[in-house]
Image (spheres, coloured by chain):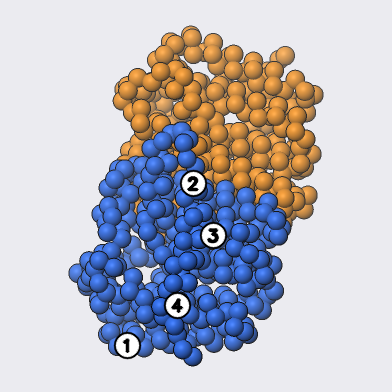
Chain colours: A orange, B blue
Amino acid sequence: MGFDKTGFLKQLQTRKEQIDRSLLGFLPVDVYPPIIHEAMYYAVSNGGKRLRPIMVVEGARLAGIPADSVMLTACAIEMIHCYSLVHDDLPSMDDDDLRRGKPTCHIVYGEAAAVLTGDALLSRAFELMAANASVSGVTPQAAVEMIGEVAVAIGSTGMIGGQVLDLQWEGQQIPFSDLQRLHLLKTGALFRASLRSGAILGGMEAQQLQDLTDYARHFGLAFQITDDILDVCGEEEIIGKPVGSDQKNAKTTYVSLFGLKGALDMARQSVEQCMASLRGFGDEADFLRDLARFTLFRQS
Amino acid sequence: MGFDKTGFLKQLQTRKEQIDRSLLGFLPVDVYPPIIHEAMYYAVSNGGKRLRPIMVVEGARLAGIPADSVMLTACAIEMIHCYSLVHDDLPSMDDDDLRRGKPTCHIVYGEAAAVLTGDALLSRAFELMAANASVSGVTPQAAVEMIGEVAVAIGSTGMIGGQVLDLQWEGQQIPFSDLQRLHLLKTGALFRASLRSGAILGGMEAQQLQDLTDYARHFGLAFQITDDILDVCGEEEIIGKPVGSDQKNAKTTYVSLFGLKGALDMARQSVEQCMASLRGFGDEADFLRDLARFTLFRQS
């Protein structure tokens, strides 16, 4: 199984550009009041990799419907991701001044506006997901099922629950099982919802949907572990934050618990489990296979 | 047109209790992590009047479907109201320590938890609205239309937009037209969405829906004007905040712009417009008529 790294990065870039072309267009422009819409735009145009919306589109493709049919939901999920970053960065939370090398939302617009910008992105996301019900090829039934699932994924027993745990453990050593639970909630839940929501909108049958769910779980772990690894040996200009910040903040990471080699082994294992989850698919799932491998090679 | 004040207050209380019986039951309990769920419970059990969910139920009743069919959405909208209060009270926003005589969410749970509690209530609200699609008598099509409408109402061109304006005008005299726009967004949009969402779930025809929309607009204004009046001549123990706080904070209100008598006249006018909006309805809309009159007599 050769992995054409350059080819895949190019494909990823094409898919990212496809998302970016729609994403900013789905934000309200030239509407009152200007300041909040400017801040929403700023928060979303942050140069992210757009992995989550790419997964929405890929879930839909595997279910047999085109990117256009789920673009509203794909962009909605990216807005949700951006909202979570804006709130996570707040002074009362992680208190981060920089995100991907740019001043965070509350640094530019002030704390009150940043809280409201996150709130507004979240509301807009649900507006877009609801609008996806009217796109041809999608049933209102599927749309409403998808909305419910995303809402659970980002709620108090999902993404927000994970952020709560993150804050609770701040400055303490986290036992491995708790660290894993934290990540499954904080980053895993939204990856899972991304891949599933495209598939649900496309009416994917239960077994395939379960396979994708398993894939997303392992993908999320691989992604988190390599995130921790990048913090140790990434390049500052590429990852957009100071290398070694986890160690400086005494954060428990896969690297602090298992060492660099141990962490890398675990990431490789998770990628293997991604492959195993996709056994029921043919070469139509090659993009997801490469996406999993990519976590091991990514530089940001 | 006699207004049986005592009878109506009793009816309002019965309807409030109907909401309260469901509302807290729709929050996740005994789930991990405990702290966020405790804070969500605290934020929702704040002794509110539950006017918005009562309006959801009433919109549904006028459309011909029972309270049970829209209870998920009614409670969802109350959770949205509670989320907006939690975020409005934050130190970076209005910085309020008390809400209806009780310590605000961030005073009890800290600022980070309060931000996340609001976020979690908003997510939960959309989960419940999506679940309303599976209730008998409601179509997924109607549910998804309702979800889209609520999302717009609470977003950057609705409720959040209003809060942005409120913060922007802080400490300044607000011209009347701007004050009115601010209130139409900050409080009006959610009242409008409340009444409409019940009606939409019940499949109400377009003209009646438009009449209710007009009613909600005038109701929202009457409610806001009498809010300003109560701040001047209400009783502290009943309204749950110090009387005269608007004047102390140099806030522009209907009273500061038009005097007590002028404000009361405007409130009466808005109530008259509520009545006019309901011309197309028979006595089945008497509850809404009394609800409008109630704004003039309410003590909190």
Label 2 and label 4 in one chain: yes
Label number found at residue B7 = 4
Subunit ID for the residue under disc 1: B
Give the farthest residue toward the left.
B248
- The residue indicated by pointer 1 is B262
Q: CA distance from mark 2 to mark 1?
A: 43 Å
Q: Amino acid at mark 1?
A: Gly
- The residue indicated by pointer 2 is B27
Q: Nearer the viewer, residue A89 or A152?
A: A152
Q: Is residue A132 left or right of residue B190?
A: right
Give the mark toward the camera: 2 or 1: 2
Q: Is residue B268 left or right of residue A206?
A: left
Above or below for A111 versus B266: above
Label 4 and label 3 in one chain: yes
Q: Quick one: label 4 or label 3, which is nearer the N terminus?
A: 4
Label number found at residue B203 = none
Q: Amino acid at mark 2?
A: Leu
Q: Quick one: label 2 or label 3, which is nearer the N terminus?
A: 2
Could you tell me if residue A13 is visible in this image? Answer: no
Above or below for A95 versus A183: below
Q: Residues within 10 Å of mark 4 (few under 14, many from 20)?
A: few
- The residue indicated by pointer 3 is B74
Q: CA distance from mark 3 to mark 1?
A: 34 Å
